[in-house]
């Protein structure tokens, strides 16, 4: 089994590292948050005093960090500390340019690298059912796949450096827009006297069907496992949805792509966050569209 350094042990990274430990890998972790460190230690991780210390004997380095600036800062710090030829995997969701810059940092230091953002939320991280969208050279992806398979159930090679981030940004623009539209439909149904269950029964088996409806239904009742049945606790927080939508609009601007639906979804989630709901599940936007502060 491999020696793995895991940098970033938060809500996503902590369970992912725990699954690697459960699979028999030797994991050394680092995080700035004492609570995250404590949880990782309970799961069986060794804890390093710094990111550079964590990677010193690592064959594989996995990072799960908030933004591109954090990934680049950490990778610059650890690239020289890791053994030559190590495999660097970044599972953060960041902008494409930063992802490509991270690949260059790894290449210049003699390492293989993969950008591998995830879909599936904290539930998928705990259950090892994440989807990994990967960018990087064929050789690097082949080396990363066995490790990623211990943390997820679907591993997709999307193309060269940065392609994983491009796929994640596009996917989550779809998700943000479809959730907003799904929530709007339920609000309209309420105004028209149609029950939540009736709309669900029709749309879930016809042309209105989507993941936002059948897996993450934004109203209580039809899908018992959705956050709507747990007080809109995330799940996938509205702040993270806004982050991803902003990344989509940044990418669209740079690429000269027209994304009017994505732009409107971004505006809606910006308003939802500004109204004090950054920590709510993103499906809670249904309450914002009703004009309510709570369900």
Image: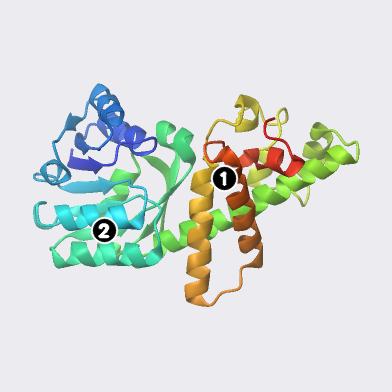
Front-most of residues 292 and 148: 292
Residue in view at x 80 percent, y 32 percent:
197
Quarter location, residue 277:
top right
Secondary structure type for disc 1: helix
Quadrant containing the C terminus is top right
The residues tagged by marks 1 and 2 sit, at their Cα atoms, a distance apart of 27 Å
Residue that numbered label 2 is attached to = 72
Relative to 51, 21 lies left or right: right
Secondary structure type for disc 2: helix
Circle nearer the N terminus (1, 2): 2
**Res 215 seen here:** no
Viewer-nearest of discs 1 and 2: 1
Residue in view at x 16 percent, y 54 percent:
77
Above or below for 235 versus 80: above
**Res 88 seen here:** yes
Residue that numbered label 1 is attached to = 273
- Outermost residue toward the right? 193
List x then y, in percent, for residue 287. Answer: 70, 38
Front-most of residues 66 and 12: 66
Q: How was this image coloured?
A: rainbow
């Amino acid at each position: 089994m491999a020696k793995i350094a895991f940098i970033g042990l938060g809500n996503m990274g902590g369970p992912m590292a725990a699954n690697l430990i459960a699979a028999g890998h030797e994991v050394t972790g680092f995080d700035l948050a004492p609570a995250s460190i404590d949880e990782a230690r309970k799961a069986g991780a060794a804890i390093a005093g710094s990111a550079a210390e964590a990677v010193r004997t690592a064959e594989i380095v996995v990072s799960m960090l908030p933004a591109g600036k954090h990934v680049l800062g950490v990778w610059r710090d650890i690239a020289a500390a890791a053994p030559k030829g190590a495999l660097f995997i970044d599972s953060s969701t960041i902008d494409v340019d930063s992802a490509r810059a991270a690949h260059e940092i790894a290449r210049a230091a003699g390492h293989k690298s993969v950008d591998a953002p995830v879909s599936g939320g904290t539930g998928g991280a705990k259950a090892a059912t994440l989807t990994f969208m990967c960018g990087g050279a064929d050789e690097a992806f082949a080396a990363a796949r066995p490790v990623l398979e211990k943390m997820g159930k679907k591993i997709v090679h999307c193309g060269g450096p940065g392609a994983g981030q491009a796929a994640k940004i596009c996917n989550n623009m779809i998700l943000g827009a479809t959730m907003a539209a799904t929530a709007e439909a339920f609000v309209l149904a309420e105004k028209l006297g149609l029950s939540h269950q009736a709309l669900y029964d029709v749309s879930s088996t016809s042309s209105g069907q989507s993941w936002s409806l059948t897996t993450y239904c934004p109203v209580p009742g039809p899908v018992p496992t959705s956050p709507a049945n747990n007080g809109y606790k995330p799940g996938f927080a509205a702040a993270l949805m806004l982050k991803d939508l902003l990344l989509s609009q940044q990418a669209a601007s740079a690429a000269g792509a027209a994304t009017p639906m994505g732009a409107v979804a971004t505006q809606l989630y910006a308003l939802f966050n500004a109204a004090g709901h950054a920590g709510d599940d993103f499906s809670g936007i249904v309450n914002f569209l009703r004009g309510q502060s709570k369900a």
